Image: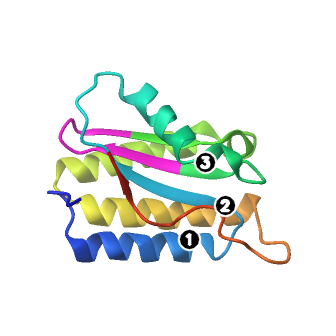
């Protein structure tokens, strides 16, 4: 599936950013682009989080960026392990930064920066101990 907001090359670069961000922590990051027109975006984001099995990581430290470009909607969902360690204001500030960049048409730049910042934050709280299996796909998913 193609996004009208990101090129194929930009989407491949976002996957690389996810790999880079995950290299330094046991956390997992996913990006999901949703083109459904349902009204309850937050509920949909939590459903996607579960359908991608993001709640099944060993340390419950997965983060989902759920985006509906057409509706100009972004939800960041972090699992319970993350919520115990990363303060809500971190996510609120990131949400504001991403949505204001989206408003200027900077979709790729905003997502790439958010992914890398998330990786840095995860590294503080979920450093790698021993091996670091990739528990979830890094590919961008669509619905």
Q: Are marks 3 and 2 in contact (CB under 8 Å)?
A: no
- What kind of element bears circle 1? helix
Residue 68 falls inside the magenta stretch? yes
Q: Residues within 10 Å of mark 3 (few under 14, many from 20)?
A: many
- Disc on the earlier residue, 2 or 1: 1
Residue 92 falls inside the magenta stretch? no
- Disc on the earlier residue, 1 or 3: 1
- What kind of element bears circle 3? helix
Q: Which mark is residue 49?
A: none
Work out how far the residue at label 1 is from the one at label 3, CA to CA, in angstroms: 16 Å
Provide residue 106's location: percent of width, then percent of height: 22, 60
For the N terminus, the image quarter is bottom left
- What kind of element bears circle 2? loop
* Residue hosting label 2: 27
Provide residue 99's location: percent of width, then percent of height: 30, 45
- Disc on the earlier residue, 3 or 2: 2
* Residue hosting label 1: 21
3 vs 2, front mark = 3
| Residue at the extreme top | 39
Provide residue 116's location: percent of width, then percent of height: 50, 67
Q: Are marks 2 and 1 in contact (CB under 8 Å)?
A: yes
Q: Are marks 1 and 3 in contact (CB under 8 Å)?
A: no
* Chain part drawn in magenta: 64-74
* Residue hosting label 3: 54
Magenta highlight: main SS: strand
């Amino acid at each position: 599936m193609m996004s009208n907001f990101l090129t194929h090359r930009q989407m491949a670069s976002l996957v690389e950013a996810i790999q880079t961000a995950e290299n330094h922590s046991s956390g997992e990051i996913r990006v999901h682009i949703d083109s459904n027109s349902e009204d309850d975006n937050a509920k949909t984001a939590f459903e996607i989080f579960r359908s991608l099995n993001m709640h099944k990581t060993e340390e419950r430290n997965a983060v989902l960026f759920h985006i509906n470009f057409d509706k100009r909607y972004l939800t960041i969902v972090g699992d319970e392990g993350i919520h115990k360690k990363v303060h809500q204001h971190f996510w609120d500030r990131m949400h504001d930064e991403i949505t204001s960049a989206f408003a200027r048409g900077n979709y790729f730049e905003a997502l790439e920066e958010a992914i890398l910042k998330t990786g840095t934050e995860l590294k503080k709280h979920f450093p790698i101990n021993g091996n670091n299996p990739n528990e979830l796909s890094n590919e961008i998913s669509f619905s």
